[in-house]
Amino acid sequence: MGTRIFLFEARRLALSAGCGMAWGAVTSQWQQALFVFLVVLLLLWGWQLARVYHWFSHPEEFPPIGGPGMQGILHDVYVLRSRAMQATSSSQRSQPYLKESLASMREAALIINSSGGLLWCNEAAEYLLGIQFATEEGRRLTETISSPSLEEYIEDGNFQKPLRIHPGTGSERCLQFEFSKFGGDDRLVFVKDVTEQDRLERMRRDFVGNVSHELRTPLTVMKGYIETLQTLMPASDLTLHKSLRVMETQVERMERMVADLLWLSSIENIEGERKEGRIDMGALLSELISDLTAAWPGKNLELQISTSQEIRGDENELRSAVSNLIVNALKYGEDSPVVVRWIDTAVGPALRVEDKGPGIAAKHIPRLTERFYRVDKSRSLATGGTGLGLAIVKHVAVSHEAKLFVDSELGRGSCFRLVFPLSRMVTSAGSAGASDQR
């Protein structure tokens, strides 16, 4: 299209110059004649541009007729503008209908602009939030509902996850906010009262935490008595010694399970808090690999670091999550090498833990992060797993706005990927591309 326009205008310029020179040859004043023809050509171009600018300010009119190349461009612009105008008109026509539908809903609904000002709300929102739209129209939502978390949530503009807040000081009431686009830069906000659901979740977390804590003392007592009996029993009584060893193994397994439950309960209780610690993932991974290599001397464990990116988060939580992923690969990857990678991706830095073990059937993958879910119960019991490792990884991922992906195929191994968002990255002072390999 650009070549056609250039050639057309070049031919028109050459034709004007030729006509000017021909007229100049007849009148013996070819310079003046050439000048006049070129001025006429420039005036023609200016007139065409003026018509185009006029059309831009009056989109309802048809485009002006130009040359062969320009006419095609103007037609394409006209089609695109017509579609945009139709979409805008359709959106404007649908908004009253949508508002009528939202007004009759039992769920609270509001519409706010890009700066958070209240544009509209239904009666359910007035009742739930205690606002009067007639007097508070245009007022910022964060002024109506005092909550630092809500203000920060709106400023961040990341509405992928709903927000839960407890409005007021020491309030048991819990509200859930869900944002979605509405029109241009406006936002449609749905608000739910999830106080009962939040209360039940807190009761469940408190119950698990309290029971786990109470189990620690009797388990410690039982373990002490078992150790005492092992020293008092005669060495010749093999049956009793075998029974005591089994009891000791099960008590140790219960201790690990209680520790995991307490840690999981702790992570859940602080899941909504911001985690802004600066974590050098390369150093953390190197330290973990060193410890696990000593604990699993017969395993082939390899670390590859191809980025120096640091992230913001909680070091203890990340250490726990990464450790669980690697230990799972060591346990269930059988004798295959386990490769741990810290890499850059298009969506953010990522941790990859890969093995070439027996793999996992597709039907199990969606449930892997459920508590106590086991793909193979007999194998899990043999390895001493608690069934809580991947549940811990999932909660750590959520609290760090990361995503956990599982790629696995029977007979070809598994790959667990923990992908962190770009917003979690910290610019590293060190040089990228470092590699550590064992």
Image: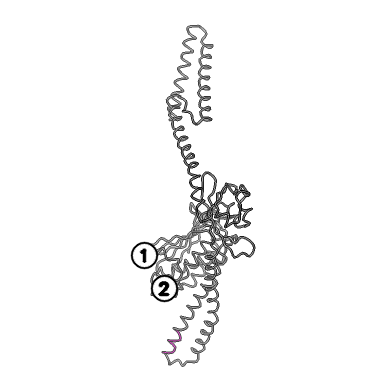
Residue positioned 52% across, 89% down in the render: 228
Instruction: In this rendered view, identify the residue nearer to me: 193 or 182.
Output: 193
- Secondary structure of the residue carrying tag 1 is loop
Q: Position of residue 405 (x, y in %)?
A: 44, 60
Query: Residue 7 sits in which quadrant?
Result: top left
Q: On the rendered image, what quadrant is the N terminus found in?
A: top left
Residue positioned 61% across, 60% down in the render: 167
Q: Residues within 10 Å of mark 2 (few under 14, many from 20)?
A: some
Q: Position of residue 195 (x, y in %)?
A: 55, 64
What amino acid is at disc 1? Ala
Q: What residue would you read off at disc 1? A: 361
Residue positioned 51% across, 86% down in the render: 227
**Residues rendered magenta in the picture:** 239-245
Secondary structure mostly seen in magenta is helix
Q: Badges 2 and 1: C-beta atoms under 8 Å apart?
A: no
Q: Is residue 177 above or below residue 52?
A: below
Q: Magenta span has 85?
A: no
Compute the Cα span from label 2 to label 1. Answer: 16 Å
Q: From the viewer's perspective, tell me whether residue 192 is left or right of residue 337.
A: right
